[in-house]
Amino acid sequence: MKDYDYTFFYTVEPIYKTVNKEECIKFIHDYPRELVSDAFGAWEPPLVTFNDFELADRWPHSIVVEYLAYDDNPSSYFYKPVEEQEFKIMINYEEVFASKTGNMIGDNDDEM
């Protein structure tokens, strides 16, 4: 599969900011378009992303929120206190969306 740079989808480079859990939840709730969540299990704990597929139809360029799925249970292997967890949000999503190139990758456009 061909590897695409973000500039294929939009011209403004995304800027991510680390926020607390409450700010992350508010961002997801207030986001103006549909977001699709995904858990990428290649990491431990899994990486959770919220994706705007109108922005880009390929991960990771669709990510507007990301965090690691730590457990709330202190006896869990993946426990981390919530105040030590990092939640990242794309703070310039409006500018990024406004800079869309119109390029999308259709199901049959991937190069092997």
Image (spheres, rainbow, N blue to C red):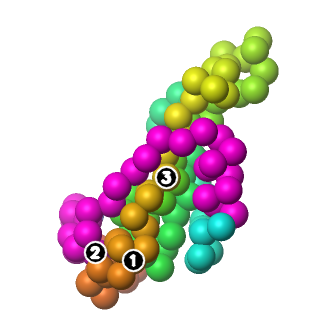
Q: Residues within 10 Å of mark 1 (few under 14, many from 20)?
A: some
Q: Amino acid at mark 2?
A: Tyr
**Residue receiving disc 3:** 89
Q: Is residue 54 left or right of residue 4?
A: right
Where is 105 relative to 67, above or below?
below
Residue 59 visible in this rendered orientation of the protein? no
Residue 89 visible in this rendered orientation of the protein? yes
For mark 1, give the secondary structure. Answer: helix
**Residue receiving disc 1:** 97
What distance separates the C-alpha of mark 3 from that of mark 2?
A: 17 Å
Q: Amino acid at mark 1?
A: Phe
| Range covered by the magenta-colored residues | 2-29
**Residue receiving disc 2:** 10
User: Which residue occupies the foreground of this view, 56 or 109?
Assistant: 56
What distance separates the C-alpha of mark 3 from that of mark 1?
A: 14 Å
Q: Amino acid at mark 3?
A: Ile
